[in-house]
Amino acid sequence: MAKGASTSKLQEETEMAARAAWLHFVGGLTQSEVAIRLGVSGTRAHRLIVKAQGLGFVHISVDATAAPCVELENTLIETFGLTMCRVAMDLGEPDPIPLRALGALGGHWLGHLLEKGAYRTIGVSHGRTIAASVEAMQRRSVNGTIFVSLLGGLTRSLAANPYDVIHRLAQMTGAESYLMPAPLFANSPEDKAVLASQSMLRDAFARMQDCELAVVGIGDLKTSTGSLAVGQANITEELTQRGAAAEILGQFLDVDGNQISTSLDGRAMALPLNDLRGREVVAIAGGLGKVEAIKAALSSGLLTGLIIDEAAARSLVEGLSDGRVAGAA
């Protein structure tokens, strides 16, 4: 066998082992289910998982990325000027947003970041992907790091409650954690000014400005999981008419990444989007339904990093190659 062919075969085997380990240890699939997913025998599935362990891919989490994912990461980094991109390997999850894959990778990334102690103050958004990432992160004692909520979120719904995210971070790390005790949107700019003048909220806004890293989610107008899900449904039609494609921290971007003006201007109890510039800003987002929103966020130049699932990343990259966003409606 030629040397090139041998190298290619070895690389293919290593990638298969990485996928088998990811499906088994992160996806929770049995070895038989892994075999079916990969189209191999049960014996080979077992051997691939053992091989991944022998290669050092498996610790408590799976620290491995298949070559196709690396290619997607590199393309997104080069296209959008990112400093970091991580693509979570596909687990075949039935839900529109692959929370298991995104949470596993997001939790691993965040835990590694905390181990390094690279940032004194980390601002945190809310949403299902960030909540899943925090939940998947290993418990660890953190000294000197402060977590700050980047937006309000008092709602009647408990789904992806920002207080749960901040509270969970405090539980799992023992770090100082500060929330924004306010709704996401005030009733008017005047009401926002009154709220922001209160000492507790004034302190919360000041702490937002201290963050060196912001971890954010990306909302869209097609699902009920974004910041508009509770109490703001009546604004969706207006946002659609004005060309809103993505939401970050209760503020809106068009398909080209430009911030747009809406009737919610001056009402978001959150860090202004322009204040994100000059900081490290990492979004954790995925799902084929959010590809257009993720592209808009990337086009804004606000993001320096992205954690995304494999299917959404591939759809995004394919859309870039032919001038459209694959998978978007």
Image (tube, rainbow, N blue to C red):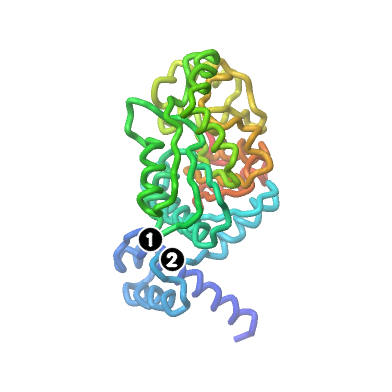
Residue at position x 38%, y 60% from top?
Answer: 26
Q: Nearer the viewer, residue 46 or 161?
A: 161
Residue 253 is situated, as x and y percent measured from the top left of the image, at 61, 29
* Residue 32 figure quarter: bottom left
User: Whole-percent x and y of residue 119?
Assistant: 57, 53
Position of 172 relative to 23 (above/below): above
Outermost residue toward the front? Answer: 199
Measuring 52% from the left and 24% from the top, which residue is drawn there? Answer: 268
Give the position of the N terminus as an image quadrant: bottom right
Residue 9 place in picture, x, y as percent: 55, 77
261 to 271, vertically: above or below: above
Q: Earlier in the sequence, mark 1 or mark 2?
A: 1
Could you tell me residue 271's position as x and y percent? 57, 32
**Callout 1: 10 Å neighbours few (<14), some, many (20+)?**
many
Residue under label 1: 26
Vertical comparison of 114 with 204: above or below: below
Q: Secondary structure at mark 1?
A: helix
| Residue 218 seen in the figure | yes
Tell me the residue at 68%/42% (across/down): 278
Residue 62, numbered label? 2
Q: Are marks 1 and 2 in contact (CB under 8 Å)?
A: yes
Amino acid tagged 1: Val
As shown in the figure, which amino acid type bears the numbered disc 2? Val
What residue is shown at x 55% (from left), y 74% (from top)? 11
